[in-house]
Image (cartoon, helix red, strand yellow):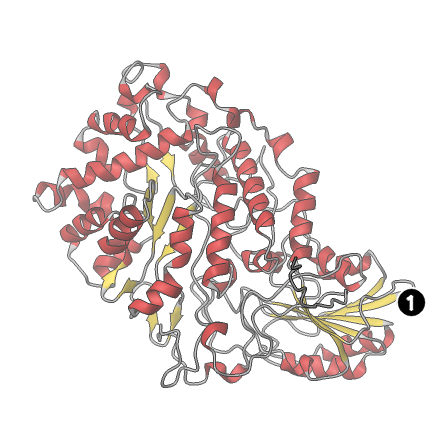
């Protein structure tokens, strides 16, 4: 954190002051607010020497002292809250940021207003942190890839498996993040990632750095591109990220068809495109698409502007000197980057920028933000089974056993790409607000031993009711880590059966997991009176779970992805990008799956009984 703070104090424009307050840029076109950001950026680039340009392409762009341009770190994260990353420092005076539920949980709310409000809150906190040099203006969120296969380790970062749901999420989260009270400047920049066809980490002999996704035109049009189109056209995103993988033989960061053709050409994208970190090197070293000189040319001419990594810093100058990469491609990329800086307000008077007045003490971790994080978790709770037992009356169930691998989960509820929250309320802590609790883990999420089962069954046998919290964590699903099975890990099925058999009172089975897991063992057992899926519910997740169990909140969430049976993946290659059924492919997602799910996409109950009837039109 100390190292990050030293970098960030020098890398954020707000901490350095505007270059327009002093020569040589003062009074030039760079500082003329009547000109467009593109025009101002063009002038700035025209003043740079070739040597100065070479330091500007990495995610940590170098300072240009001659023009009073400070260094800038492009890489900050804000998937579900301002998150630890190269451009963010959680150190005094900015120790915390609100940690919302992981995206898969907020997606389960199907609430567009909520998604927008979360984006707005995140950018408010980001701006307050940037004002003391502890965060940047460019945030690499949202992740809008489709969950094609339930084993994907990063599926929980996304809104799920449906292109329409994901596109709608992007259309509302992105404006929430970017737009605010100042129409002249971006509040912060959102980044639509990972463009495109990226949905595997390391499976079946390939990994994300060398995988060539074979995608037919129909799947491209109705599955893999709609969310990105919406992110640009409806969300008005100012950033995009090209992905590690190749599509049909062309690495994404060298794919002119999708970046300059689709994004900038057909969709009207007006912003910058960064590579994923190390993806430019992958073009050369893992995809073997081009040599070092040609890779520099190919990525810039395809439409990429910034290299998260050091490939261009190492090889671009040589490529230019050999006549391979034209200076026009270099200048176009830099103009996109400096136009973003203009839109951030880096060259404008502070008096014209209300975001510079945001204070950490009044804009971060406020009571309103804490309540929004709780409300987001509540709205993401998905009740899948209830025989009428729930909600519980706390006066009738004074002692509750809270058992299972995720019963006392804290950081697990943040999943990944998270910052430092002000607090974490585990399921055990949440239930403790309503009843006396008995706790036993039973086993961890790997559940390689049943030695702790007896403590869990003893607690269930003694208590008046039981909340059994099973599932997985980033131990099983994470960036760089796909699962090989969607069954409950290890002996967890046995734990479920044992606790259900031993319990004295009703049992609510809570499934804490991002990706699909097969919990048929609870669905078919009548001793499981209720089942609730919660994803990864963030800093107030345990409170939200307890609020549903005890009826303070009426559940309203719906599954954002299919819960498949565990044999779904038998013989199904992670490398098969086809959505529609075929040989060894039973069809992917609710749109094309030909089997019977454990629970279908969109499933979800409430405590309210609804009746529907057709209301015929009034005819006169």
Quarter of the figure that contains the C terminus: bottom right
Outermost residue, front direction?
620
Is residue 32 found left or right of 570 in the rendered image? left
Instruction: Identify the residue under disc 1.
Output: 396
Q: Is residue 107 visible?
A: yes
Q: Is residue 78 visible?
A: no
Q: Position of residue 519 (x, y in %)?
A: 62, 78
**Residue at horizontal 56 percent and vertical 45 percent from the top:** 116
Image quarter for residue 110?
bottom right
Q: Position of residue 369 (x, y in %)?
A: 65, 41
Is residue 223 found left or right of 440 in the rendered image? left
Q: Position of residue 68 (x, y in %)?
A: 32, 22
Which secondary structure, mark 1? loop
**Residue at horizontal 49 percent and vertical 42 percent from the top:** 175
**Residue at horizontal 68 percent and vertical 80 percent from the top:** 523
Q: How many marks overall?
A: 1
Is residue 16 found left or right of 2 in the rendered image? left
Q: Which is more toward the observer, 154 or 390?
A: 390
Q: Is residue 47 above or below residue 381?
A: above
Image quarter for residue 211?
bottom left
**Residue at horizontal 33 percent and vertical 75 percent from the top:** 205
Q: Is residue 432 above or below residue 351?
A: below
Classed neighbour count for the residue bearing mark 1: other residues with Cα under 10 Å, few (<14), some (14–19), many (≥20): few
Outermost residue, right direction?
395
Image quarter for residue 518?
bottom right
Q: Which is more toward the observer, 450 or 398?
A: 398
Q: Position of residue 425 (x, y in %)?
A: 71, 54
């Amino acid at each position: 954190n100390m190292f990050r703070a030293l970098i960030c104090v020098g890398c954020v424009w707000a901490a350095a002051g505007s270059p327009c307050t002093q020569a040589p840029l003062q009074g030039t076109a760079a500082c003329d607010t009547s000109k467009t950001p593109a025009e101002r950026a063009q002038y700035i680039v025209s003043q740079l020497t070739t040597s100065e340009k070479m330091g500007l392409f990495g995610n940590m762009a170098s300072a240009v002292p001659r023009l009073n341009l400070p260094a800038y770190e492009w890489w900050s994260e804000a998937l579900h809250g301002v998150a630890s990353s190269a451009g963010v420092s959680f150190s005094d005076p900015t120790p915390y940021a609100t940690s919302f539920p992981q995206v898969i949980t907020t997606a389960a709310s199907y609430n567009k207003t909520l998604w927008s409000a979360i984006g707005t809150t995140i950018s408010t906190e980001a701006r307050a942190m940037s004002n003391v040099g502890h965060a940047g203006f460019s945030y690499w969120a949202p992740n809008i890839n489709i969950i094609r296969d339930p084993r994907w380790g990063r599926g929980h970062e996304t809104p799920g498996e449906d292109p329409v749901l994901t596109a709608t999420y992007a259309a509302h989260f992105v404006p929430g993040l970017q737009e605010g009270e100042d129409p002249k400047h971006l509040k912060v920049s959102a980044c639509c990632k990972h463009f495109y066809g990226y949905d595997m980490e390391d499976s079946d002999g390939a990994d994300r750095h060398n995988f060539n996704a074979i995608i037919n035109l129909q799947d491209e049009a109705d599955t893999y591109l709609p969310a990105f189109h919406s992110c640009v056209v409806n969300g008005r995103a100012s950033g995009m990220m090209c992905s590690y993988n190749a599509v049909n033989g062309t690495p994404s960061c060298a794919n002119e068809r999708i970046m300059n053709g689709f994004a900038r050409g057909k969709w009207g994208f007006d912003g910058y495109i960064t590579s994923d970190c190390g993806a430019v090197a992958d073009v050369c070293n893992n995809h073997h698409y081009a040599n070092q000189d040609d890779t520099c040319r190919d990525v810039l001419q395809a439409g990429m502007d910034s290299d998260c990594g050091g490939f261009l810093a190492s090889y671009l100058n040589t490529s230019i000197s050999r006549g391979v990469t034209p200076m026009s491609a270099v200048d176009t990329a830099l103009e996109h980057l400096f136009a973003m800086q203009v839109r951030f307000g880096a060259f404008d008077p502070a008096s014209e920028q209300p975001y510079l007045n945001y204070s950490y003490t009044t804009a971060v971790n406020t009571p309103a933000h804490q309540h929004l994080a709780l409300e987001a978790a509540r709205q993401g709770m998905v009740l899948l089974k209830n025989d009428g037992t729930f909600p519980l009356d706390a006066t009738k169930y004074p002692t509750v056993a809270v058992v299972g691998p995720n019963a006392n989960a804290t950081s697990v509820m943040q999943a990944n790409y998270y910052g430092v929250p002000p607090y974490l309320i585990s399921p055990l802590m949440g239930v403790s607000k309503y009843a006396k609790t008995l706790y036993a883990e039973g086993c961890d999420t790997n559940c390689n031993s049943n030695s702790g089962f007896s403590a869990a069954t003893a607690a269930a046998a003694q208590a008046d009711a039981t909340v059994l919290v099973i599932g997985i964590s980033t131990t099983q699903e994470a960036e760089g880590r796909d699962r090989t099975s969607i069954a409950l890990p290890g002996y967890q099925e046995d734990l479920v059966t044992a606790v259900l058999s031993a319990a004295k009172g009703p049992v609510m089975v809570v499934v804490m997991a991002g990706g699909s897991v097969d919990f048929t063992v609870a669905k078919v057992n009548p001793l499981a009176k209720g089942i609730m899926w919660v994803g990864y519910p963030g800093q107030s997740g345990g409170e939200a779970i307890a609020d549903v169990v005890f009826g303070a909140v009426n559940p309203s969430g719906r599954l954002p992805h299919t819960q498949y049976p565990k044999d779904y993946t038998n013989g199904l290659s992670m490398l098969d990008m086809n959505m529609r059924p075929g040989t060894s492919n039973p069809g992917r997602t609710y749109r094309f799956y030909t089997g019977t799910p454990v629970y279908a996409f969109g499933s979800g109950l409430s405590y309210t009984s609804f009746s529907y009837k057709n209301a015929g039109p009034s005819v006169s």
